[in-house]
Amino acid sequence: MALYVMKFGGSSVGDTERMKRVARRVVEKQDEGHQVVVVVSAMGDTTDDLIDQARLLNEEPPLREMDMLMTNGEQISIALLSIAIHALGKNAVSFTGWQAGFRTEPVHGKARIIDIQPERVQQALDAGNIVVVAGFQGMTEDGEITTFGRGGSDTTAVALAAAISADFCEIYTDVDGIYSTDPRIVKNARKLSEISYDEMLELANLGAAVLHPRAVEYAKHNQVCLVVRSSFNHNEGTVVKEEVNMEQGVVVSGIAYDKNVARISILGVSHVPGVLAKVFGSLANAKIDVDIIVQSGVQDGKADFSFTVGLSDREKALSVINNIRGEVPFEDITSEDGLVKVSIVGAGMVSHPGVAAQMFDVISKQEVNIKMVSTSEIKCSCVIEGSKLNEVVKALHTAYGLDTKDQVFVGGPEDRR
Amino acid sequence: MALYVMKFGGSSVGDTERMKRVARRVVEKQDEGHQVVVVVSAMGDTTDDLIDQARLLNEEPPLREMDMLMTNGEQISIALLSIAIHALGKNAVSFTGWQAGFRTEPVHGKARIIDIQPERVQQALDAGNIVVVAGFQGMTEDGEITTFGRGGSDTTAVALAAAISADFCEIYTDVDGIYSTDPRIVKNARKLSEISYDEMLELANLGAAVLHPRAVEYAKHNQVCLVVRSSFNHNEGTVVKEEVNMEQGVVVSGIAYDKNVARISILGVSHVPGVLAKVFGSLANAKIDVDIIVQSGVQDGKADFSFTVGLSDREKALSVINNIRGEVPFEDITSEDGLVKVSIVGAGMVSHPGVAAQMFDVISKQEVNIKMVSTSEIKCSCVIEGSKLNEVVKALHTAYGLDTKDQVFVGGPEDRR
């Protein structure tokens, strides 16, 4: 007998028939002799519908009240799933985030979990129930309802798995695992049987659509064994864990890409101490996430530098920079979209020099210009012209021997709730 | 400055425009210098929609999970109303039943309130907020979410008004007060400016659609000053309180009727001790509410008796009685529908003998047969042929001088959520 946490996203419980299928899947697991906790998201478009209703009343609804509003999406899901499980003759008990013991910091819209007191979950399990827990939500010490923000339900599942020492945390989704790259681009993309937390983190951060990076970090920190698999079939998924049995010669596990990239370049900046801190401090204050930062050499006491932000932050970033022109004098500012960031990821890269050089070589052979580069111990990213995405990903997939091996990846962020 | 509890039902917050209207109404009250707590029901058909979804999954959904499901209706309303109030530049804080301190007995679907700990409501009021509380819901000592059943939001409003010592508890609805009878039947029906709790209780129990009897009882017990008024205009409503300034000569305040009546007659029952207890005990065990009970005189050791139940309980009641035929022998059992119960209500009746006799006289003058009679200190009810309803109500309304005085009533139960 093992203890499983099974997490199903919004599309897996999108309508009554899908809800019934999830109920059967969960009951199947219990029938195999296991204890089961299920974490569910809001059904299909429920959250978006609630947000739309709020915006009809108020263009800037207060965050506290939005949390009060949005948590209903998950609470409706857990009740309905529990009702569907009862229809199969099994006992199920649903718990909201606060009932399941999720305590968070006093922040609305993106609260972090500070503690989980899973006694009620444990007691309900011990009494033979399938326990159904609302994802994405918790409560502050003062009894205020909070939500976790994007990737919240994945985080709920992983955190709860850690708190109750579950043997496995299965993330059910609409793909059946982690692929070596996007199968929509590379026909030969292969499903990986295993991947390390760090590789998954790089892939998740780079725009992979299956697991939210926050959940992967939580899993890594608590050594929770994650399994990514399909809610539509019984194929074995991809196991995400600390130690991966690396095949001989496998250096790059997967190829990821991210289309949500805008580049901003500031030209002729006076090179005095504190300039970078001023620029990026201002962007951080405006809550703009900056990804890659590249600075050119200094000439005549002036430097050019470029950085990338998400497409939706492009205009805001330009205006933030223009607003500090008095304190940080520069000659010109330009921006560019229509770009894509392509990355190779692999835990083996750290011990294999020349992997990045090989990437630049492959890209240049496609006669594609590399606009920016960023590297870490287990990944190398290049920003290129968006129109060249497919040919570059295909070439890299072949060059690193992924067409024939059992390896990583996943689509763009547009699939992700 | 006074402290108001304002309660709005589902139809008052049925869509975005109505929600905005309620927000304006509430802000208006605060602008007049008062403190305001608002209690709201689920929007329009939300609760029914949730129930429908549950039934698609399970024909007999467990009550605990139905409570988990249905409470979302009110929680969505409070968040949206609070968001709409913020749009008007005022601070509002929404609270679920458990956050507002409603503690209930551990029963699902129709829990009774055992205690209210309104500290959070009081603190939020003291901080200058409009406080928006979810009707119909509470929490048990063990942290289980419960609902109050029919009339639950009225009860929430009255109970909270008592707990925070509110000066007024205003029930906003789709009629602008309590009328001397149903205006759809009697054109001259008049709105009452005042009515006593006891009269309102009789009217509520007799099928009045405006206030749930449970809420009126709670108000009477806690001496909460209730005001029934329209959410669609600013007309003064009807005040329900203990002491009413009775006009000279006003004996009957209003005429009520109830179409939800089926009569069951058991004929030739052996008249031995315990027979009535057995019959009505069995009906009570089957959760069938019996209203009027009439027993004829005993002849040859045998008696006939009749009682009324709601139309939907008719078949069930017949089968319960047939099942105990072994223990309670009788000759025959018959049932009848197409009936209506007409009642006159008035606190003045207790000191005016002959009021009931006058009622029988008025009805007989319409050549209508009285099938059953039931009386209390402040009301007298007659069951008659349903087809005679309108003429009897009109005749009574005129006979008791209500056509020209400022007096009571309200429609059938079909308007009531």
Image (tube, coloured by chain):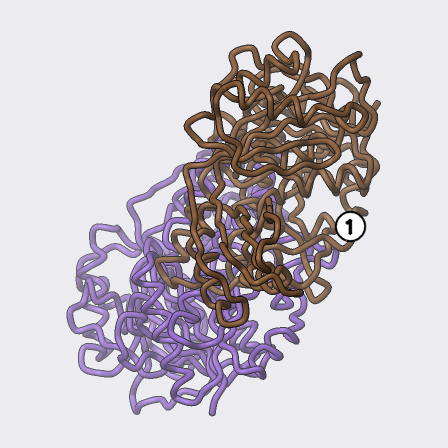
Chain colours: A purple, B brown
Chain letter belonging to callout 1: B
Task: Say above or below: B8 vs A150.
Answer: above
The N terminus of chain B is located in which quarter? top right
Judge by depth and name the residue closer to the eye, A258 or B343.
B343
- Is residue A324 among what the camera can see? no
Judge by depth and name the residue closer to the eye, B176 or B11.
B176
From the viewer's perspective, tell me whether residue B249 is left or right of residue B327. right
Q: Which of the 4 image quarters holds residue A349?
A: bottom left
* Residue B138 position in % (x across, y down): 67, 53
Question: Measuring 67% from the left and 36% from the top, which residue is drawn there?
Answer: B375
Task: Say above or below: B256 vs A399.
Answer: above
* Residue B61 position in % (x across, y down): 45, 63
Task: Residue at the far front: name it.
Answer: B300
Report how many numbered discs are placed on residues in the image: 1
Q: Which of the 4 image quarters holds residue B399?
A: top right
Question: Measuring 50% from the left and 19% from the top, which residue is drawn there?
Answer: B366
- According to the image, label 1 marks what residue? B116
Question: Measuring 18% from the left and 58% from the top, which residue is drawn there?
Answer: A367
From the viewer's perspective, tell me whether residue B406 is left or right of residue B292. right
Task: Say above or below: B161 vs A131.
Answer: above
Q: Secondary structure at mark 1?
A: strand
* Residue A142 position in % (x across, y down): 74, 55
From the viewer's perspective, tell me whether residue A175 is left or right of residue A188. right
